[in-house]
Amino acid sequence: MVTNGIINLFCLDFNGEGAPYIQIDDKQKNIFQKYFDNLDVVKKYAQRHKVYWLCIKKGEIKIDGVSALGHCEAYPRSKTLNNYHNEVRQYKVTLRGDIDLHLKQKEIQKINAGFGIDVNEKDFYYWLFFHELGHTYEANKDYHAGATVPSETEEELKAKQKFRIKQEELAKKYCVKLYMEWKSGLNIESLPG
Ligand SMILES: [Zn+2]
């Protein structure tokens, strides 16, 4: 699958009315399970946040020229962008799939020191995923990835920068919340749909 010039290793498509979410073959499923050992958990969280596409990408993800490990995009349902902010709330989450051990360990150290928690290598992609979920409407209504901010005047640009910083702060908070919820061993069935 190719979107926006990105060659994805693969995408899980959670979309489709009543369709089974895994419409990937066993080979793709095996690849996916290298990142997430429990696809049911991933599905549950994705659906709860209206993330309909989850992609693992080979190579760097660049957002405004800055390298990132993940990205959350609000996805338009149609070409008409009227009411985009209010009505269209589907998301596509892309995660970088080729993070080497060194970078992973460095990131984990930062996370554990910064948040006072204990993320291990096995949980790392859940952490990245939960962070991106923090950019959805379900997580942070006024700061979700599809919120539009004017950026024409200098004032507006400054405000936009502040907005971005706040957006990240809130996504980080939400990520910790989801991570703790997940780690507390809540039965998957008891998670709100
Ligand atoms: Zn973020």
Image: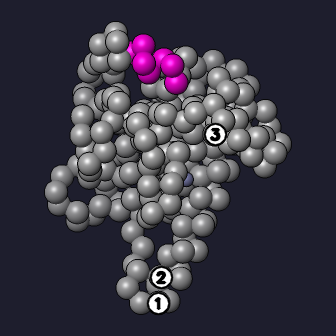
Q: Quadrant of residue 18?
A: top left
Horizontally, residue 23 falls left or right of residue 120, namely: left
Q: Is residue 5 visible?
A: yes
Amino acid identity at mark 2: Leu
In whole angstroms, how far apart are the C-alphas of marks 2 and 3? 32 Å
Q: Could you tell me residue 173's position as x and y percent?
A: 67, 50
Instruction: Kindly check if marks 2 and 1 are in contact, taking CB atoms under 8 A apart as contact.
Output: yes
Percent from the top left, x then y, of residue 91?
37, 45
- Packing grade of label 3 (10 A; few <14, some 14-19, many >=20) is few
Q: Which residues are magenta?
A: 29-35
Mark in front: 1 vs 3: 3
Q: Residue at x 50, y 60 (%)?
A: 66
Looking at the rendered structure, which numbered label has been put on residue 157?
A: 2
Mark 2 or 3, nearer chain start: 3
Mark 1–mark 3 distance (CA, rounded to whole Å) = 36 Å
Nearer the observer, 120 or 156: 120
**What residue would you read off at disc 1?**
154
Residue beneath disc 3 = 103
Q: Is residue 60 left or right of residue 170?
A: left
- Residue at the spot 78% in from the left edge and 49% down from the top edge: 114
130, above or below 190, in the image: below
Mark 3: secondary structure: helix
